[in-house]
């Protein structure tokens, strides 16, 4: 049996009472791992670069095995852009190349940059018009109930490409779940952790990684999910927030 373990941490007040979002995490692990994982999540919330949390919610919930879907991990392509201005320009070009209307991409960027502080979840944006489609306000749509099917294989797969660290590890799992959704054209993301400037554009088949999508020290980050016009928004939100997904990583072939 796998358990969904979810953490959200805020400062000043709980999220639902207007607290500032500090950190969140979602995993699917077996029972023996739950205690250790909740400890790690607590420490992460207490010692976060966005500030010290004073509200922490950790939920542990059993997942019925027959409900779990599997999706493939997205391959990573590293993009060359020397700074965040070049990175943002290139990200808009990639978004257009994978099917987002350039005006909608620009409108999405503008909405993300206009946020007073980062949200806990993502905005659903129409890939044709750039209009916001979800009604979750500053909460956003939080993708949940996902993990890799084999951590050891994943670590090796990342290391072989020179990647390590929690940010890319978690982002690739989230992006792979999102990319497999019906109705998603692309995702744009950069971190809300002040020291972490990297971000990505994900299409249905590639994770395009940029070393800089924001200036160093900036605490404003976020996620945009560009949605195909005419998609069933309720079904999409149900998949993103509730469908348990394990991301399958190919075994690294030993020479
Ligand atoms: N569902 C929806 N939106 C989320 C989720 C989630 N589970 N988790 C985070 N977000 C949104 C939220 O608005 C955050 O403010 C924003 O994304 C950034 O979250 O090296 O670290 O966890 O290739 O800070 C990307 C680059 C790092 C990784 C992303 O995001 C790499 C990152 P963070
Ligand atoms: Mg963060």
Image (tube, rainbow, N blue to C red):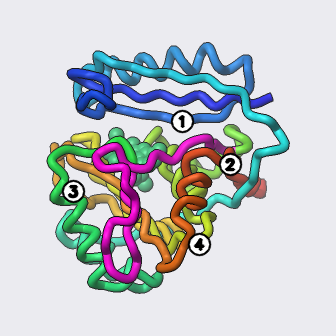
The local secondary structure at tag 2 comes to strand
Of circles 3 and 1, the one toward us is 1
The residue where tag 4 is placed is 205
Which disc, if any, is residue 245? Answer: 2
| Circles 4 and 3 in contact, beta carbons < 8 Å | no
Please, what is the dominant secondary structure of the magenta stretch?
loop
Q: Inspect this view and state whether residue 156 appears.
A: no
Residue 134 on the magenta span:
yes
| Circles 3 and 2 in contact, beta carbons < 8 Å | no
Mark 1–mark 2 Cα distance, whole angstroms, equals 11 Å
**Mark 1, other Cα within 10 Å: few <14 / some 14–19 / many ≥20:** many
Mark 4–mark 3 Cα distance, whole angstroms, equals 24 Å
Report the span colored magenta: 122-148
Q: State the residue lying farthest toward the right.
A: 66
Seen at 39% across and 65% down, the residue is 133
The residue where tag 3 is placed is 214
Seen at 41% across and 17% down, the residue is 43
Q: Earlier in the sequence, mark 3 or mark 1?
A: 1
Q: Earlier in the sequence, mark 4 or mark 2?
A: 4
Residue 104 picture quarter: bottom left
The residue where tag 1 is placed is 26
The local secondary structure at tag 1 comes to strand
Kindly tell me whether mark 1's CB lies below 8 Å from ligand 1: yes
> In the image, ligand 2 is in what quadrant?
top left
């Amino acid at each position: 049996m796998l358990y969904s373990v979810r953490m959200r941490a805020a400062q000043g007040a709980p999220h639902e009472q207007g607290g500032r979002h500090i950190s969140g995490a979602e995993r699917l692990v077996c029972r023996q791992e739950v205690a250790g994982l909740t400890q790690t999540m607590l420490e992460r919330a207490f010692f976060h670069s966005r500030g010290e949390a004073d509200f922490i919610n950790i939920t542990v919930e059993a997942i019925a095995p027959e409900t779990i879907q599997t999706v493939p991990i997205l391959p990573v392509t590293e993009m060359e852009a020397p700074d965040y201005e070049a990175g943002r320009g290139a990200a808009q070009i990639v978004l257009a190349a994978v099917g987002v209307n350039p005006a909608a991409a620009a409108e999405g960027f503008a909405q993300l940059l206009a946020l007073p502080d980062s949200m806990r979840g993502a905005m659903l944006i129409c890939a044709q018009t750039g209009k916001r489609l979800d009604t979750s306000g500053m909460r956003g749509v939080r993708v949940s109930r996902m993990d890799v099917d084999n951590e050891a294989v994943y670590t090796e797969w990342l290391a072989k490409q020179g990647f390590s660290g929690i940010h890319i590890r978690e982002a690739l799992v989230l992006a792979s779940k999102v990319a497999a959704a019906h109705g998603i054209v692309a995702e744009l993301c950069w971190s809300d952790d002040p020291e972490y400037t990297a971000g990505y554009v994900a299409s249905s088949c590639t994770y395009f990684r940029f070393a800089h999508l924001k200036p160093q020290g900036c605490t404003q980050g976020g996620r945009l999910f560009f949605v195909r016009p005419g998609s069933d928004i309720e079904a999409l939100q149900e998949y993103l927030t509730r469908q348990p997904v394990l991301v399958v990583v190919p075994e690294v072939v030993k020479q």
